[in-house]
Image: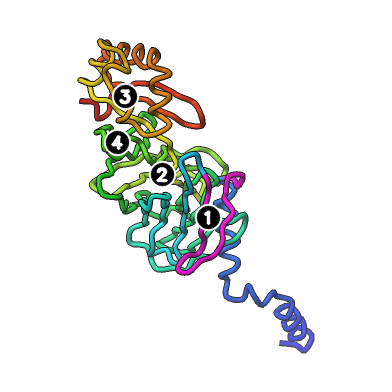
Amino acid sequence: MSAASLAAAIALVGSATPAFADGTPNDTARAVSVVEKASGTSDVASSTSSAGAAAQATTSTEAGRITVTAPASSAGQVKAAAADGTSLGLQLENAKSVTGVKAGAGTVVYSGVARSTDLAVQPTTDGGARTLVTLKDSAASTDQRFALNLPEGALVIPDADGGYHLSRTTQGGQSVMVGAIEAPWAKDANGKPVATSYKLEGNTLTQHIETNKNTAFPVVADPKITWGNVTGTAYFTKSETKNISIYGATAAISTTMLPPPLNALYAINASLVTAKASEARSDGYCLKVKFAAGIFIPGVYSNGCD
């Protein structure tokens, strides 16, 4: 090598940013860019670091304060905890232990948790948590398995959109929705939707992402969980639905069996509830009553209706 060439090489090395020498900051910046392009950032909650967590965000909702924790390591659980002490945990199975790094608009990234796979967590302003998996190329697994850590007595009920309602039984015997696993989505590098679906086996949630030879990588897929921030959805059985349709809402079901504010609104909207119960009964469905964002919504459901 000539003196001139050696000098040029030394100058080139000297101009590189030392912090990027091991590639890790570059990997983090790239991973955050991919995830935030797919998910957006308008609803990412402000978070702080805490002991044992890469980020923690506390949000006030109609049902109280919800705290979302992104674990310090990818081997830990993403957790949404309600003010009553109950919580829902979600953990990517068989993930390597990788330290989380908060970057971008508040996304926590765990790079290289599996073959050609990154993991990211975003606490959201509605008290939920997105747990995003990035398939960097075709070598990544198209089946991503998550372990659910459910509180005692919690039930997982399929909804009509491909996600799940999470419910618990009140002292009055009603099944009340207290959380959700939202319908799955996935996007390719061009922002185009990629077909995806959930399968639940026991407490293991598998998200299947249908990539093919035409898929533009990287692909981002998102299970999103909420816990404790749904004011309430009451699910009524077929016999209860029948009684409400025959005898009327307030006569058939005591309002003391429902959580506030459903109890008060149930009585006020008794005629709407009775009409919806009659509709559900005639179609062979069951009645459900939802309260969210100040709106009272009677409806019907079929999955788990007995």
Pointer 2 or 1: first along the chain: 1
Which residue is located at x 41 percent, y 44 percent? 228
Q: CA distance from mark 3 to mark 2?
A: 21 Å
Query: In terms of secondary structure, where does tag 1 sit?
Result: strand
Q: Quadrant of residue 2?
A: bottom right
| Range covered by the magenta-colored residues | 40-60
Residue 220: image location, x then y, percent: 49, 48
Q: Give the class, few, some or many, for how many residues have Cα within 10 Å of label 2's Cα (few <14, many ≥20).
A: many
| 245 with respect to 21 (left or right) | left
Which residue is located at x 33 percent, y 26 percent? 255
Q: Which numbered marker is on residue 57?
A: 1
Q: Which numbered marker is on residue 157?
A: 4
Residue 45: image location, x then y, percent: 57, 50
Q: CA distance from mark 2 to mark 1?
A: 15 Å
Q: Which numbered marker is on residue 228?
A: 2
Query: In terms of secondary structure, where does tag 2 sit?
Result: loop
Q: Which residue corresponds to mark 3?
A: 301
Q: CA distance from mark 4 to mark 1?
A: 27 Å
In front of the other: label 2 or label 4?
2
Query: Is residue 45 positioned above or below 269 on the image?
Result: below
Which residue is located at x 25 percent, y 45 percent? 153
Instruction: Residue lying at the far bottom in this picture: please name it.
Output: 3
Q: Which numbered marker is on residue 15?
A: none
- The one nearer the camera, 37 or 211, is 37
In front of the other: label 3 or label 1?
1
- The one nearer the camera, 24 or 51, is 51
Pointer 3 or 1: first along the chain: 1
